[in-house]
Amino acid sequence: MPKVPKELSLPGLDVNAALRSILEGTATETGERFFQALVRNLAKVLNTEGAWVTEYIEESRKLRALAFWMRDQWIEDFEYLIEGTPCARVIEEACMCTFRRILSSSTPRTPTLPNLMRSATWERR
């Protein structure tokens, strides 16, 4: 198994067990159900409140959720303008960013987020 870069590692996470759990949780699913199983299992394994898989719509500079799981519920029909957000850097620079925590509860750049995530400013690790 390849070594996980330090900036992407999570304390206490057994990478092999995490991958095994994700694989077991998605192995029988296809299509949309695969993405739903993937995000639920990612959130569980990484001990986060949510996860999403998106497609990028270049013409409108939006991310469209293929599956979005947050705080034990599905977020349906979610699109997100990336301008001025951490996601813009990921798309524009083809890089990976990780975020440790929410720092504040207000930012005008994310007005389209659902109530569960609205107005979060993220600290880049």
Image (cartoon, helix red, strand yellow):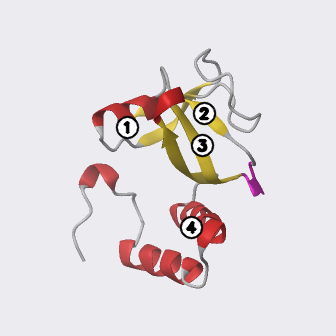
Q: What amino acid type should be assigned to the residue bearing mark 3? A: Arg
> Within 10 Å of the Cα at label 3, are there few (<14), some (14-19), or many (20+) other Cα atoms?
some
Q: Position of residue 124 (x, y in %)?
A: 39, 33
Towards the viewer: 34 or 52: 34
CA distance for labels 3 and 4 = 16 Å
Bounds of the magenta span?
A: 71-75
| Residue 27 sits above or below residue 14 on the image | below
Q: Name the residue that disc number 2 marks.
A: 80
Q: Position of residue 118 (x, y in %)?
A: 69, 29
Side (left or right) of 28 relative to 123: right
Q: Position of residue 71 (x, y in %)?
A: 73, 52
Q: Secondary structure at mark 1?
A: helix
> Within 10 Å of the Cα at label 1, are there few (<14), some (14-19), or many (20+) other Cα atoms?
some
Q: Is residue 125 visible?
A: no
Q: Name the residue that disc number 3 marks.
A: 64
Asked if marks 3 and 4 touch (Cβ < 8 Å), the reply is no
Asked if marks 3 and 2 touch (Cβ < 8 Å), the reply is yes
Q: Name the residue that disc number 1 marks.
A: 90
Q: What amino acid type should be assigned to the residue bearing mark 1? A: Val
Mark closest to the chain's N terminus, 3 or 1:
3
Mark closest to the chain's N terminus, 1 or 2:
2
Mark closest to the chain's N terminus, 3 or 2:
3
Q: Which quarter of the figure is the N terminus placed in?
A: bottom left
Q: Name the residue that disc number 4 marks.
A: 38
> Within 10 Å of the Cα at label 2, are there few (<14), some (14-19), or many (20+) other Cα atoms?
many
CA distance for labels 4 and 2 = 20 Å
Mark closest to the chain's N terminus, 3 or 4:
4
CA distance for labels 3 and 1 = 15 Å
Towards the viewer: 55 or 113: 55
CA distance for labels 4 and 1 = 20 Å
Q: Secondary structure at mark 4?
A: helix
